[in-house]
Amino acid sequence: MSANTNPSIITRNTDDIAAVTGNLYESVSIISKRARQISSKMKEELNNKLAEFASGVDNLEEVFENREQIEISKFYERMPKPGSISIDEFMEGKTYNAYREVEEGK
């Protein structure tokens, strides 16, 4: 690994991903839907934690609160990305996809 390579980048075997559903595109679709769910949940959690610091009053404690907000934000930045989490869940069989029945004539 070169010095410029991001250590969070993982090479995935597309054959392994496709083997779960029998179709690479279907697998990627399921993974991407799950990644959006995870991303939405993480964003909501972060916003809720940061909302605790919201205040319309400027005071000396604001500097301390800003440090806490920064630490919370950095924690979320260091977390695994939603795409990586969803791929891992998919490959471990923790993700499923419910198919809707399509009625003929509609």
Image (cartoon, helix red, strand yellow):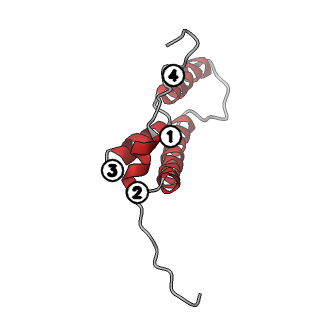
Amino acid at circle 4: Glu
Amino acid at circle 2: Thr
Q: Which residue is mark 4?
A: 71
Q: Is residue 28 left or right of residue 106?
A: left
Front residue of this view, candidates 19 and 97: 19
Q: Which residue is mark 2?
A: 21
Q: CA distance from mark 3 to mark 1?
A: 14 Å
Give the mark, 4 or 3, whose residue is nearer the N terminus: 4
Q: CA distance from mark 2 to mark 1?
A: 18 Å
- Please state which of the two labelled residues, at mark 4 or mark 1, is closer to the viewer: 1
| Residue 83: mark | 1
Amino acid at circle 1: Gly
Q: Determine whether 95 is above or below 91 in the image.
A: below
- Please state which of the two labelled residues, at mark 2 or mark 4, is closer to the viewer: 2
Query: Looking at the image, do the residues carrying marks 2 and 3 touch, with CB atoms under 8 Å apart?
Result: no
Give the mark, 4 or 1, whose residue is nearer the N terminus: 4
Q: CA distance from mark 4 to mark 3?
A: 31 Å
| Residue 94: mark | 3
The local secondary structure at tag 2 comes to helix
Residue 60 appears in which quarter of the rendering?
top right
